[in-house]
């Protein structure tokens, strides 16, 4: 079975001007994610991992009835990423 993990940070807490100076909390969270990713790679379960674009430069396109609707941001208030992994035998 394949799984999709979504990670996000409220956009109000993400600022491109300060992205090079992450908070201690952000560093700890990323270290935890990196550990998980290493475990998934080691077990052969890792499929892929990618970051989502910042809401200011992202658009989500979806169908609503017979129309196609574009919405700013993957989620208007979030920035994050996704990781796909597959568990064998589940």
Image (spheres, rainbow, N blue to C red):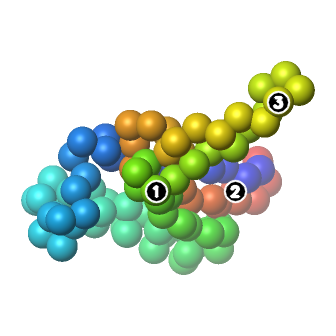
- The relative height of residue 25 versus residue 10 in the rendered view (above or below) is below
Of the image marks 3 and 1, the number of the one nearer the N terminus: 1
Q: Is residue 46 left or right of residue 87?
A: left
Q: Is residue 90 left or right of residue 60?
A: right
**Circle number at residue 57:** 1
**Circle number at residue 87:** 2
Which residue is at the front of the view, 26 or 17?
Answer: 17
- The residues bearing labels 1 and 2 have C-alpha atoms spaced at a distance of 33 Å
The percent coordinates of residue 65 (x first, y second) are: 85, 22
Is the residue marked by circle 2 packed among few (<14), some (14-19), or many (20+) residues within 10 Å?
A: few
Residue placed at 65% from the left, 40% from the top?
70
Q: Nearer the viewer, mark 2 or mark 3?
A: 3
Report which residue position mark 3 lands on: 67
Which residue is at the front of the view, 76 or 26?
Answer: 76
Residue placed at 62% from the left, 50% from the top?
4
Is the residue marked by circle 3 packed among few (<14), some (14-19), or many (20+) residues within 10 Å?
A: few
- Evaluate if marks 3 and 1 touch, with contact meaning CB atoms under 8 Å apart: no
| Quadrant position of residue 35 | bottom left
| Quadrant position of residue 71 | top right
- The residues bearing labels 2 and 3 have C-alpha atoms spaced at a distance of 37 Å
Residue placed at 56% from the left, 59% from the top?
83
The percent coordinates of residue 27 (x first, y second) are: 20, 63
The local secondary structure at tag 3 comes to strand
Of the image marks 2 and 3, the number of the one nearer the N terminus: 3
């Amino acid at each position: 079975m394949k799984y999709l993990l979504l990670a996000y940070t409220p956009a109000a807490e993400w600022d491109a001007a300060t992205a090079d100076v992450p908070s201690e909390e952000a560093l700890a969270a990323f270290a935890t994610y990196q550990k998980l990713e290493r475990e998934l790679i080691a077990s052969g379960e890792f499929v892929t991992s990618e970051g989502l674009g910042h809401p200011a430069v992202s658009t989500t396109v979806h169908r609503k009835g017979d129309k196609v609707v574009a919405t700013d941001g993957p989620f208007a208030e979030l920035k994050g990423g996704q990781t796909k992994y597959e568990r064998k035998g589940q």
